[in-house]
Each structure stands twice: as C-alpha cells, then as structure tokens.
Image (cartoon, rainbow, N blue to C red):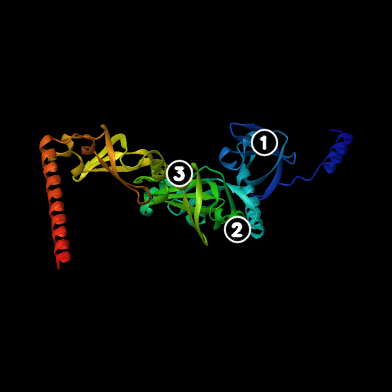
Amino acid sequence: MTNKDLTLFEELFNESPEIKYPKTGEVISGTIIKIEKKNILVNVNNQFTGLVVSKEVGNTVDLSELKSGQAIDIMVLGDSIERGLLILSLKRANQIKNLTNLAKYNESSEVINVKPTEANKWGLLVDIDGLKGFIPVSQLTPLHYPRVEGADPEKILEHLNGLVGLDFKVRVINVDENGKKIIFSEKAAIEEDRTKALKTLKEGDIVEWTVSGILSYGLFVTFAGLEGLVHVSEIDWGHVTDPSKFAKVWMTVKVKVIGLESEKISLSIKRLKENPWDVLAKKYKLNDSITAPISRISKFGAFMDLEGWIQGLIHLSEISHGVVKDIRDHVKVGEEVTAKIINFEPNKKRIGLSLKALQEAPKETKKVEAKKETSEEEKIDSEVKKAKKSEAKKETK
C-alpha cells in the first residue's frame, strides 16, 4: 500500500460517522429493510442490521401497514454474534411510548379505544403490547354489564367472554409509573352523553333503546348510558311468563317512558299497543257468540284463547246442562269451539263464556224449569190475593 493510499484511507476514516454501538435496553430509531414471515429486518444508522422477531412485534402493530423504508422506534435487546445481527423489539419500544401516552390520557380524560383480550369474573383484561390493563365489571356501561339471574358467576364469565375482541371506548382512570396498575372505565367515557340524555328524557317519551339484559322479572334496555326496566307486567297485555320470548340481548326495541324518578327509569312495551280488552269490546257485546280454541283446562273450567292473549273462562257449570265429571269428555285443548258471552266487563278485564247457553236443554230440564216458573207464578198470585183481601178488610172497617 502506497503512502498515497494510506493518506486517502485516513481521510475517509476521519470523514466517516462515528460508530456508536447500541446499548441493551436503549430505544433507537431504524429503517425497515424487509418484512418476512412476520419478522422485520431493520437498518440501524447504516451501520448495523437488526432483527425484530415475530413475538417482539406486539399486538398493536398491523404488519400490513408497515413498508420497506419506513422509520420505526425499537428497543435493543442484545445481539447475535452468530448472525451478526442486533436483536430488537418493536413491542417494548411501544410499551414505553404507550405508558407515556396512557399517563397523558389519565390527566386529560381523553377517550381512547381498547380491545379486551381476556376475561375473568371481575372484568375484562386488555393487553397493549404487553402492558396489562383492566376494565372492572363496575366500570362497564349498561350495554355490556352482565345482567345475570341470581348473579351466577359462571354465567357472568360466559357473558364477559362474549365481549372479548370487541372495541371499547374508555377513559384511563388509573395508571402508575411502571404500568403495573392500569384501570380503564367505559362508564366514564360516556358520562357527558349520559348526563345529556337524562336531562332531555321525560315521561311519555317513545324511544328506541337496546336490550341489555333479560331476567325473569323483565327486560333491561339502555341508551347513551341510561338503563331502564320494562317490568314483566309491562311487556305485553297478556300474561308473560318468559320475557326472553319477546326480545333478545342487543336487540333494538321501541319503548314508552312511564316512570322517571331520579335515575330509576320505568318503561313499557305493551302501552304502545291498543289494549286488547278495548279491541275485544269493539267487536263483541254481551250475549254475542265467539269462536276460539281451547288453550287449557283446569278443574274448575276450560279457557278459550281469545284475541290479544285474553283468556276467557267457561266455568265448569257452563260446560253442559248435564253433570260434568270430566271436562275433557266435552272439550279438548286446541279444539276450536263457539261459546256465548254471558258476562263481559272490559274495564275489569272479565269475560265469562258458556257452551251450554248455545245448547238446547234436555226435555226433563225444560219441565223442571217450567214447574219452577209455574210455582213462582202461583206464589206471586197468592201474594197478590192476600194483599187484595187485606185491602178489602181495611175498606169495610
């Protein structure tokens, strides 16, 4: 090598940038060279090549959005002498960035999006590139709160598992410096909407809300963080034994506000429909005949399934003119029959029906009834005669 070559080499060496070997745990910048099989090859300062293996990419990064030539921040985990590569982590660099951001969100009360990755009986767990956050059950909005019969822990967990993977709008309500206690609140994220909705809601309003829970005593429905109850007696005009037959969770239903006391909201579905007793009263009157199927039979009579879930009773004494030992000998469940209305009080929700009133009475029965009528007439004549004699005696005196 000549002196001229040595001089040139020295000049180039002096002009070249200083080689700084990255330290373990340091967060540095790099440029993506290539993405292959979920691994990222990175150029560090045009001096080193680094590798981010798939498990160090993190769960908040969408690989499809990363491209060659794009700058990223990564943490140095070490190096591989065999490969001549730096071992890097995109996930851990993002952890530091995310923890800083979460602290800012906590102070500013900014609403952010998170996606639960697991559930336990106390709430939903959120994994943000290895940072563990938690949404307690008490911090869920009515739409996601587990309304479970008898607070059954297994059913609560089943409900919460169904929320894993959904997008949640939340606020950070607690975060410590090392990121070991990060608490999110879904309720806090909609507090303004909830307050506004409560101020504008009034009794008599008809609204479309979402079913958030179904229990034996009614339907819970929610909107903008408000939750009201459609009591079982307000679901339908008929007798409701199973509210789940009328709605499903997350189904939208139209309801009427019938009670509003502070935050206790009472709702009704049935009052959006015409009262079936009023409908029946428009079609029928006392002594009319009505045709409908037999819905059930009890020891004191048979019930007819009338319009609008109304159950009309044919009392045992109105089944037949003869002695009725077993009602099933005369009518069967599901059989369509015609009966006479012998008592009708729509305001009191009463209707009495009779089969025998439409049947011709046996001759013997007619004779007995005729004798009774004759006997009654004779009694009346006797009383009239006695009265006349008494009046005559008074006049004589």
Residue at coordinates 11% horizontally, 42% vertically from top-left? 368
Q: Residues within 10 Å of mark 2 (few under 14, many from 20)?
A: few
Q: Nearer the viewer, mark 1 or mark 2?
A: 2
Residue at coordinates 84% horizontally, 37% vertically from top-left? 9
Q: Nearer the viewer, residue 44 or 316?
A: 316
Q: Nearer the viewer, residue 186 or 38?
A: 186
Residue at mark 2 to residue at mark 3: CA–CA distance = 29 Å
Q: Nearer the viewer, mark 2 or mark 3?
A: 3
Residue farthest to the front, as pictured: 396
Residue farthest to the right, as pictured: 4
> Which of the two discs, 2 and 3, labels the residue nearer the N terminus?
2
Q: Of helix, strand and loop, which one carries label 2?
A: helix
Q: Nearer the viewer, residue 378 or 240?
A: 378
The residue at which mark 1 appears reads as 66
Find residue 85 and report its horizontal and vertical position in percent: 64, 38
Q: Of helix, strand and loop, which one carries label 3?
A: loop
Residues at discs 2 and 3 in contact (Cβ within 8 Å): no
Residue at mark 1 to residue at mark 2: CA–CA distance = 46 Å
Residue 18, disc: none
